[in-house]
Each structure stands twice: as structure tokens, then as C-alpha cells.
């Protein structure tokens, strides 16, 4: 009888297919949906900002009101005094519509992620700061975990709250939610600074991903495995 031929076994491939996923499918899906929604919000937010790059504090603010501060850029409306001798193309219409749609996409995705995070223990296992750093290359350190929790439970809710507070409909239905922020113009100013904080976080997050190995980290967030 002929000798049996044994093919070599690729143990790495076996381990890769049998090892538990680093990120669950829902975490990966909500991560990328939130990324797309945030980038759309950022782009449209800049377009909306260009229409009136002046910020105020209180309930009301307009071109006849002394601003708290001004972004030194030309506006897309000729009635807004900026010191520049020209105006930019007005993209305020479509940008407000897309901003609103992207905001609801981000809110619904965030609610799904938070519900999953609590029900599955995802926050407890992966984001609560550990008592000690195990030195595992796939785990987040204490600062990263704390930062992610701050973004999820402080910055994102605050940017949503201040965004809703700028809506006249929300202000008429829930005036207390606007008054506690100091007024609609105060909400807009806070919204701007929270957005800046989120952009700083995004840049820091990308930097950490690059330092940890960009291709591997992105592949992990797509496939769920290292």
C-alpha cells in the first residue's frame, strides 16, 4: 500500500480562524458608520460655520451684536462683517440638510452601540480602566480607555445636546434644556468647542493607530481579527 501523504498544517491560519474576534461585528459596524457620519458632520459643520463665523453668548446674537469671538475667515453671506472684501460661495442649504441627516445617523448608531456595550459587557471588558496594565499589545492602556469613555459618555452626548438646543423646535418644546446652557447662542458656542475637542481626539486616535501599526489596526477593525 502506498505511503500516505500528509500535507503540512498552517497552524497560524488555524489559529486565525478559531481565535475569538478582537472586535465584534456590531462594534466594527458602528465604528465605521460613526466615522462616516462624523466626517459628514464635520464637513457640513464647516460649511454652516462659514455662513456666520461669529460666536456669541446668551440667547440672541446677530451682526448688530458684539461677538464673543470671531473666526478670522471670510463668510458666505455678504451681510456678515468679516473684514474681507469678498464672500465665499453659499453652501448653507445642502449643508444644513446633510448635517441634520448625519446627526440622526450618528445618534441612532451611538444608541445602538451604548445599548450593546452595556448588555454584552463590552464596556466593562474593553473600556473600563484595568487595575493594572497586562502588557498585552492588543489591549488599551489606562489613558486610552479613560479617553474613549470620556468621548462616548461626555463629549458625544454634549455635542448632541448642544446641537439640538440650537433648534427652535427643541427650544420651544424643551426650553429648560436650552436655558441650562445659557441660551441658543451659548449652545452654538459650546457646540463649536466640543467639536474642536472631538477633532483633537480623532487626530490623536489616528496617530495612535499609525504608531501601533496602521494596516494591522485597520484590518482588525474590518475583519475583527489581528
Image (cartoon, helix red, strand yellow):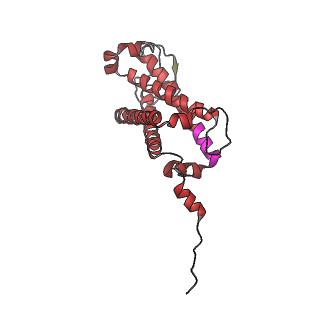
Query: In this view of the protein, which residue sits in the foreground, 100 or 154?
Result: 154
Q: For the magenta stretch, what is the residue range?
A: 204-213
Residue in the picture at 42% in, 33% down:
115
Q: Position of residue 59 (x, y in %)?
A: 41, 13
**How many numbered discs sit on the rendered protein?**
0
> What secondary structure characterizes most of the magenta part?
helix
Asked whether 206 falls inside the magenta stretch, the response is yes
| Of 119 and 144, the residue lying toward us | 119
Q: Residue at x 44, y 21 (%)?
A: 188
Camera-side residue of 182 and 52: 182
Give the left or right position of residue 32, taking residue 142 as reference. left
Give the residue furthest to the front: 1
Q: Is residue 194 visible?
A: yes
Which residue is at the far bottom?
1
Residue 81 shows in this picture: no
Coordinates of residue 217 in the picture (x, y in percent): 57, 48
Q: Residue at x 56, y 80 (%)?
A: 4
Q: Is residue 160 magenta?
A: no
Q: Residue at x 57, y 74 (%)?
A: 7
Percent across and percent down for residue 112 are 40, 36
| 135 vs 111: above or below | below
Indicate the position of residue 129 as horizontal and vertical percent values: 60, 32
* Quadrant in which the N terminus appears: bottom right
Q: Is residue 194 above or below residue 27?
A: above
Q: Is residue 127 left or right of residue 64?
A: right
Amino acid at each position: 500500500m502506498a505511503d500516505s501523504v500528509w500535507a503540512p498544517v498552517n497552524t497560524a491560519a488555524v489559529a486565525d480562524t478559531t481565535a475569538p474576534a478582537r472586535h465584534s461585528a456590531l462594534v466594527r459596524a458602528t465604528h465605521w458608520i460613526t466615522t462616516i457620519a462624523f466626517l459628514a458632520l464635520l464637513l457640513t459643520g464647516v460649511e454652516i460655520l462659514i455662513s456666520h463665523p461669529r460666536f456669541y453668548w446668551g440667547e440672541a446674537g446677530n451682526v448688530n451684536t458684539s461677538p464673543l469671538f470671531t473666526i478670522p475667515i471670510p463668510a458666505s453671506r455678504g451681510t456678515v462683517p468679516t473684514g474681507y472684501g469678498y464672500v465665499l460661495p453659499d453652501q448653507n442649504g445642502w449643508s444644513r440638510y446633510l448635517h441634520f441627516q448625519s446627526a440622526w445617523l450618528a445618534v441612532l448608531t451611538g444608541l445602538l452601540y451604548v445599548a450593546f456595550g452595556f448588555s454584552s459587557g463590552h464596556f466593562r471588558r474593553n473600556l473600563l480602566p484595568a487595575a493594572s496594565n497586562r502588557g498585552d499589545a492588543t489591549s488599551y492602556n489606562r489613558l486610552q480607555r479613560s479617553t474613549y469613555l470620556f468621548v462616548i459618555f461626555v463629549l458625544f452626548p454634549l455635542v448632541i445636546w448642544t446641537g439640538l438646543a440650537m433648534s427652535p423646535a427643541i427650544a420651544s418644546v424643551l426650553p429648560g434644556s436650552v436655558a441650562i446652557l445659557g441660551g441658543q447662542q451659548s449652545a452654538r458656542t459650546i457646540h463649536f468647542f466640543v467639536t474642536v475637542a472631538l477633532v483633537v481626539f480623532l487626530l490623536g486616535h489616528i496617530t495612535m493607530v499609525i504608531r501601533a501599526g496602521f494596516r494591522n489596526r485597520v484590518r482588525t477593525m474590518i475583519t475583527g481579527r489581528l
